[in-house]
Amino acid sequence: MQLKQRDDWHLTEALQYEHGRGDPFAAAVRGTRMPMVITDPSQDDNPIVFCNVAFQELSGYDREEIIGRNCRFLQGPKTDRESVAQVREAIAKGDDISIDLLNYRKDGSTFWNALYLSPVRSDDGHIKFFFASQLDVTDRVESQRLANERKEVVEQEVERRTADLKAALEAKTILLHEVDHRVKNNLTMIGSLLRLQVRTIKHPETSAKLGSMLERVDALAAVHRQLYQSSDVGQFDIGDFVKDLATDTIGSSGRSDISVEISAHSMMVPAANASALGLILNEILTNAIKHAFAEGRSGTLSVVTGTQGADIGFVKICDDGPGLLADQSLKKMGTTLINRLSTQADATAVWTDNCPGTCVTVSFPVDRTVA
């Protein structure tokens, strides 16, 4: 019991300091506001052999209740066992450790203890003591806990809203696909009715006009078929569309003497422009067949897609027919309809001489982030 009654300054003797009460280290340890203890690993269970007043005030225990006990008396039911194991391992290895522990005061209240533990070695490297400082960081830990809880609440809310938006988008996608599917079916039905009507008309000019209308209906049906099959309801792949359209247009014309050369890649445009662009391309292709390869003239039709700059795409359709003979030729080739449709799609159509033949280049905005 004599050890418990000795004053703080005696520790300097145990640490092999040559000074007594006037030693500045002893004075600093006694006077500091930071709680401190020193344990002696040479004794059974590594008991506390020194504690300053700040530690007594932090823990609520008197000196007589502290000296001679292992530091684990501050632990309680909610103290993290894994953290305690880390402290025990550091002591066993003679290492420093800095860790936050949930500790208990004498009255049962808890506090978060920022513990720093370090061995004190003799000249020969032997561990004589362990020095431990403590700091009540309850406010910091609680603030962090509240911040984490709020973060979790926010993340859960974001996740919930994201799920709602995803569900809404999926519902919208299903709805739009259903609309495109029904429009495609209706256009197909209209096309069938027009075909029946064409067969009954004996007047060649009227029959030709209805045939042209039928081709446009088929083009619109093809647009909505591709929109229905697309995974992105906001985008339309004009590159894939023009490849299919060119092949189908030549095939439906029955002109096996017209060869098609296609160099097209995927190129996305806003879905809102799909119908207008589809009609423009259909008009150019059908006009080429009717005028460039009129009267059974054979030849080659080429289709090329590409980009100009960062956000402009183009489709270039060329034939090797007679070419542009006069302004009247352009009127015959349906330029009025193409120009009106180009305005709707924010596009431009330019006719040039292909020497021989004619080229029509349609330029329009594309989404390079998707293409």
Image (cartoon, rainbow, N blue to C red):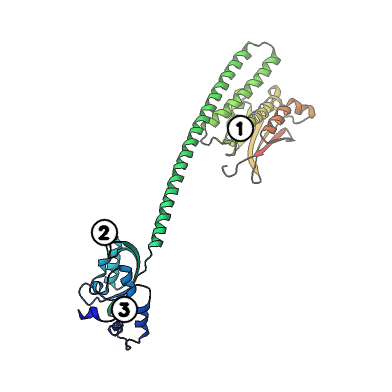
Label 3 neighbour load within 10 Å: few <14, some 14-19, many 20+: some
Judging from the image, what secondary structure is the residue with disc 2 in? loop
Kindly indicate whether the residue at mark 3 contacts the one at mark 1 (C-beta within 8 angstroms). Answer: no
Count of marks, rendered view: 3
Q: Position of residue 191 (x, y in %)?
A: 59, 19
At 66% from the left and 30% from the top, the residue drawn is 280
Q: Is residue 85 left or right of residue 334?
A: left
Label 1 neighbourhood size at 10 Å, few (<14), some (14-19), many (20+)?
Answer: many
Q: Amino acid at mark 2?
A: Pro
Task: Name the residue tied to disc 1.
Answer: 274
Separation of marks 2 and 3 at Cα, in angstroms: 31 Å
Closer to the observer: label 2 or label 1?
A: 2
Q: Residue 351 appears in which quarter of the rendering?
A: top right
Which is nearer the eye, 146 or 213?
Answer: 146
Question: What numbered label is drawn on residue 37?
Answer: none
Task: Judge from the rendering whether residue 164 lies leftward or rightward of residue 36; answer left or right.
Answer: right
Mark 2 neighbour class, 10 Å CA radius: few under 14, some 14 to 19, many 20 or more: few
Residue 365 vs 30, above or below: the answer is above
Q: Nearer the viewer, residue 269 or 244?
A: 269
Upstream in the sequence, badge 1 or badge 3? Answer: 3
In front here: 163 or 101? 101
Please state which amino acid type lies under the numbered disc 3: Val
Q: Which residue is mark 3?
A: 120
Q: Quadrant of the N terminus?
A: bottom left
Residue carrying label 2: 77
The secondary element bearing badge 3 is classed as strand
Front disc: 2 or 3 = 2
Which amino acid lies under the numbered mark 1 shown in the image of this protein?
Ala
| Percent of width and height locating residue 63 | 27, 74
Residue 319 is at least partly visible in this image: no
Compared with 204, 280 (above or below) is: below
